[in-house]
Amino acid sequence: MGREAVAMCRWQGEVAEVKALLESHEIILRGDIRAKISRATISAPKIDKDALVLRADGETLRLELGLKEAEKWLTALLKPLPSLAEKLGVSKSSKAFVIGKVDDAELKTALVGAATKAPKDAAVLIAMLRNEADLKAAIKAARGAAHAPVWCVYGKGKFATLSDSAIRTTMRANGFVDNKTSGVSDQLTATRYRLKQERDGG
């Protein structure tokens, strides 16, 4: 979504000017009031005069955005979030070839009916990265199916076994460029890569 504004904020009994950011999965407050409010906890967003008002975690958030900006935020918040399958670009008609074992429940659900055993039939590759061997396997498979981008899926935060920077450095050194990121679950994140010549040619 990527909207941001400076606004007077009322949250959890405090009132202060904040920099508010509306991201795809959360509202971030910076300044004298600091908070990250997950969209999963938000309910009943509405416009009150020139402010956006909503409920989250049993509390009321009020942001004095001005009427026009508040209406834009409300429209964005009322729009359903894309599913994980939509974010990854997989469906029954847009198959994924999976490299490695998928243990994550949310990713398993996203891949139901959308997986293929033939890389040539895949619209996208999904590579589960836990170690350097997995990364090498992903690169080999992605080179063999250069028509399709590859999502490198790996742990984040305390669940990380390979760092984002290490993956990016290795992928770029092997001729790939990253062009999109996506959250997968509480434990996993993903970055999409494509061979340079594929990007340059398309």
Image (spheres, rainbow, N blue to C red):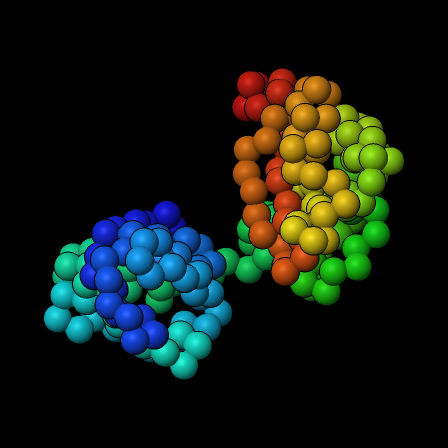
Residue 26 sits in which quadrant?
Answer: bottom left
User: Residue 132, position in %: x, y?
Assistant: 83, 35
Residue 34 sits in which quadrant?
Answer: bottom left
23 sits left or right of 185 in the view: left
Q: In this picture, is 195 found above or below 43?
A: above
Which residue corresponds to the image point at 59% horizontal and 31% vertical from the top-left? 178
Task: Specify the quadrant that holds the C terminus.
Answer: top right
Q: In this picture, is 2 found above or below 45?
A: above
User: Residue 48, position in %: x, y?
Assistant: 17, 73
Q: Residue 82 or 189: which is nearer the viewer?
A: 189
One can see residue 72 in this view: no
Give the residue at the far bottom of this rendering: 58
Which residue corresponds to the image point at 79% horizontal and 38% vertical from the top-left? 119
Q: Residue 95 or 54: which is nearer the viewer?
A: 54
Numbered circles on residues, count = 0
User: Residue 3, position in %: x, y?
Assistant: 32, 50
Q: In this picture, is 37 found above or below 92?
A: below
126 sits left or right of 179 in the view: right
Which residue corresponds to the image point at 72% horizontal and 26% vertical from the top-left? 170
Q: Residue 9 or 202: which is nearer the viewer?
A: 9
